[in-house]
Image (spheres, rainbow, N blue to C red):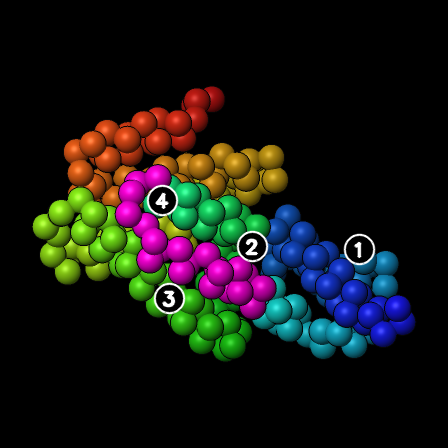
Amino acid sequence: MAKKAPRQTAQRILETALALFNRYGEPQVSTTLIAAEQGISPGNLYYHYPAKDALVNALFERYATSLDELLPAAAQVRHVEDAWFLLHSLFELSWQYRFLYRDLNHLLSRNRHLETRIRELVAHEVAAARTLLIGLQRAGNATSTELDVMTTANCLVVVLTYWLSFEYIRDPRHALEPEHGQVAALQGARHALGLLAPFLTPAQQTHLRTLQDAYTMPVD
């Protein structure tokens, strides 16, 4: 059991860092705070993660691994239900690592590793979105051009990347709190679904509107 302790400690530190980054924003959280929250010394934390960027990079790689497991499903999308499930899953994953999106510009300005990896990730997302749209297009015999496909694929990734920032701008005090997570994910998925309409048959467009109506939240 003793051999497993360092790995377990490293994972617990990551979970604590993720919770704090999500709650307060990465710029507001120091390694000293993470160590105190975890109940370990700063030296113990530095043994596993010698700088805060090491924590950020480790969390990003966990996120990227989960994303890489989801995106291949785009190749199997033939119906709006398939697209709905994938988009909803992507928004839920984004919520789990929401600090990356909330603080994206700040992180990219000082973390070269993240700057490189996020470009790769976005390219992967755009390619998956294109595959999803082509699958819908072929299943519905739609006549969209490649420009239509790529424009919509980019828009889907923009919504996925910046939806939480949009929610935060609209309600900075509450939007990214845990109790609002489901609403944020639902609203993001609802708007992303709306971009699919030109690639669907009339029957699927009707079903799309039914799915969107289920996502509609009452306004306070």
Query: Mark 4, residues whose alpha carbon is within 10 Å: few (<14), some, or many (≥20)?
Result: some
The Cα–Cα distance between marks 3 and 4, rounded to whole angstroms, is: 19 Å
> Secondary structure under badge 4?
helix
User: What is the quadrant of residue 208 in the picture?
Assistant: top left
Residue linked to disc 3? 124
Residue type highlighted by circle 2: Tyr
Left or right of 81, for residue 133: left
**Residue 82: mark in rendering:** 4
The earlier-in-sequence mark between 2 and 4 is 4
Q: Position of residue 117 (x, y in %)?
A: 46, 73
Q: Residue at x 80, y 65 (%)?
A: 9
User: What is the quadrant of residue 36 in the picture?
Assistant: bottom right
Which of discs 2 and 1 lies nearer the camera? The answer is 2
Of 8 and 70, nearer the camera is: 70
Residue linked to disc 2? 97
The region drawn magenta spans 60-82
The Cα–Cα distance between marks 2 and 3, rounded to whole angstroms, is: 18 Å
